[in-house]
Image (cartoon, rainbow, N blue to C red):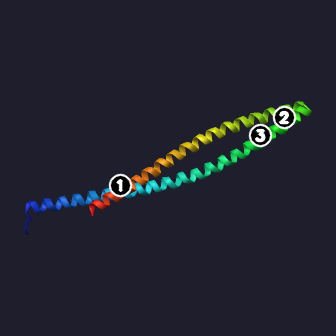
Amino acid sequence: MEQEPESDRRDSADAMTTTSSNAVEGGGEAMARGLSAMLESVIKDFDSKSLDTLNSQDKLSASLDRLVQELDQLLESAPLPFIVQHASRITSVKQRVSSLNLVLKSIQRRIDNIDHMLSANSTTTTALDKTSSDTTL
């Protein structure tokens, strides 16, 4: 059995270490891209649903405004006690819907900011990946 010289064994070990570390880095990048794509789709789905909710809330708010105006007119012409009671309930619901709309709009702004940051990070990562692949060639 022939024995390899010490320098050949070291060169071989260095080559294996470099190859395995490159494979780990490549696997990490692939995992990061996959995770980023998954998060992007989840955020876009949530964004779409939150926009639908905002539109629904705006329609509800407009309907409540119309109803309150009609009740105010009814109260002016015939102030019956049960109408006054229902009018106050509707006014209370309108205030809660308005408050909820403000919260939803705040959440939407935060989601837009996260989406913007992810898009910017994705663009930067893609540019860096392209630059590093160009330099390794």
User: Which comes sooner in the sequence, label 1 or label 2?
Assistant: 2
When asked about the image quadrant of residue 26, the answer is bottom left
Q: Are marks 3 and 2 in contact (CB under 8 Å)?
A: no
Q: Amino acid at mark 3?
A: Asp
Vertical placement of residue 137 versus 48, above or below: below
Q: Residue at x 77, y 41 (%)?
A: 64
- Label 2 sits on residue: 72
Question: Which residue: 35% across, 59% down?
Answer: 130
**Image location of residue 5, percent across then percent down:** 7, 63
- Residue 28 seen from this side: no
The percent position of residue 34, horizontal first and vertical second, equals 43, 57
Q: How far, Cα to Cα, is label 1 from label 3?
A: 53 Å
Tell me which amino acid carries mark 2.
Answer: Asp
Dot 1 crowding, Cα within 10 Å, few <14, some 14–19, many 20+:
few
Instruction: Say the numbered circle drawn on residue 65.
Output: 3
Is 28 left or right of 40, judged from the image as shown? left
**Left or right of 49, for residue 3:** left
Along the line of sight, which residue is nearer the eye, 130 or 99? 130
Callout 3 secondary element: helix
Alpha carbon distance from label 3 to label 2: 11 Å
Mark identifier at residue 128: 1
